[in-house]
Amino acid sequence: MATIENSTQTLTLTMNGTEVTFSPGETLYEVAQRHVDRDVPTLCYDERLEAFGACRLCVVEVEGIRNPVASCTTKATAGMVVKTHTDGLEAHRRTLLEMVASENREIDVDPLSGYASQEMKTLVDRYEARTGRFQGKQSGKSRPDDPNPFIKRDYDLCISCYRCVRVCAEQEGDYAISVANRGFETQITTEFGGFLKDSACTFCGQCIQTCPTGALADHKALRSKDVPGEVKKTRTICPYCGVGCSVDLMSKGDKLVGVLPAMDGPANLGALCIKGQFAYDFVQHSERLSTPLVRGDDGVLRPASWDEALDRAAQGFKDAAANHGEDSIYAIASGRAPNEAAYLTQKFIRATFGTSQVDNCSRA
Ligand code: SF4
Ligand code: SF4
Ligand code: FES
């Protein structure tokens, strides 16, 4: 009975002078996000991953503990008295940001670099940390020699948050990249230091999208860096398989320039595969059909109206059924089509021709 009472007991702590509730297992960062302060800065944190505690930007003061603790890795306990913003904490955060900023050749990376690529720039600006006080030694050697067309490996901009390594392991289950060496020699690398194409990498792009500095960046999207205009984002569903991952298409004017995974997409929570992430060229391919084509008596395709094309197709179906029987007709619904179109395809084949020879390719 005592156990039941304990498990239903409301747990509370005090944060920035306000009593707040929390659930067993929650971290101070999660409690702060939910209740009091959505402004605690982070750099090594990605809510989809195990907290890591590397950057120390999220530190908070806890009464009775001498040094500030990382809120992303510290579990909340009942009765804690926590402060998330004090002059001391803010000074500490600014100094940390000055140090990480001092290592990077470039802070203002292009937003086309990736979903999280502006995180460091935003924090450096918020804390006015471009002071140059700690300029000097740098870590991370870029790999401009890697010939892959998708992922720019510009490790001069790496701050060793390890989000890329963790997302590759925890989210993608791939373990294609890892950390070699320590301190200023720290290097994100593949096994044997080779190219990504020779590693276990599936080019899912997750490491790009979680990188907070643009050290890992979307090579393909960056090709449109100099296309004039603002980047517009349009929420849609990936047109490939039946999973239905949510994406934000990036466009400049009428040009599709890249794809961002939707972190709040119910089917994917920010994950994509190589096709959803990078295979969007078909949308604006010069050979994409823009009008129906029918074959003339000479066997050559020519543009036609929709009515003419549909009449021709209907006649083809009828001829096939009449000459070869109903089972000579077989439909495959495209995995790119929505459920409604797939439903209509099977209805059309079953009701019109009396055959059940229908399938689809949504098995990715
Ligand atoms: S490449 Fe990016 S995500 Fe990976 S450790 Fe460096 S800064 Fe972090
Ligand atoms: S693209 Fe995907 S599989 Fe390849 S290193 Fe990045 S996270 Fe790992
Ligand atoms: S976000 Fe908590 S230590 Fe980096």
Image (cartoon, rainbow, N blue to C red):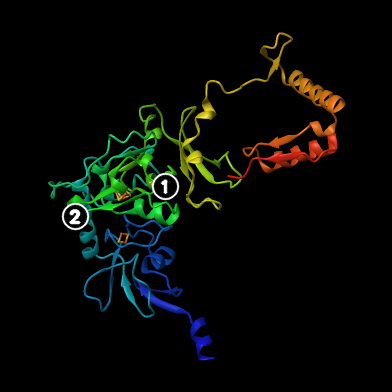
152 or 327: nearer the eye?
327
Res. 46 image quadrant: bottom left
Find ligand 3 in the image and state its quadrant: bottom left
Percent across and percent down for residue 85 are 29, 64
- Queried on whether the Cβ of the residue with tag 2 lies below 8 angstroms from ligand 1, the answer reads no
Q: Residue at x 21, y 61 (%)?
A: 92
- Queried on whether the Cβ of the residue with tag 1 lies below 8 angstroms from ligand 2, the answer reads yes
Q: How crowded is the residue under tag 2: few (<14 C-alpha within 10 Å), some, or many (20+)?
A: few
258 or 62: nearer the eye?
258
Residue named by callout 1: 206
Note whether residue 190 is visible: no
The residue most toward the right is 322
On the rendered image, what quadrant is the N terminus found in? bottom right
For the residues labelled 1 and 2, the Cα–Cα distance comes to 25 Å
203 vs 229: above or below: below
Residue named by callout 2: 183
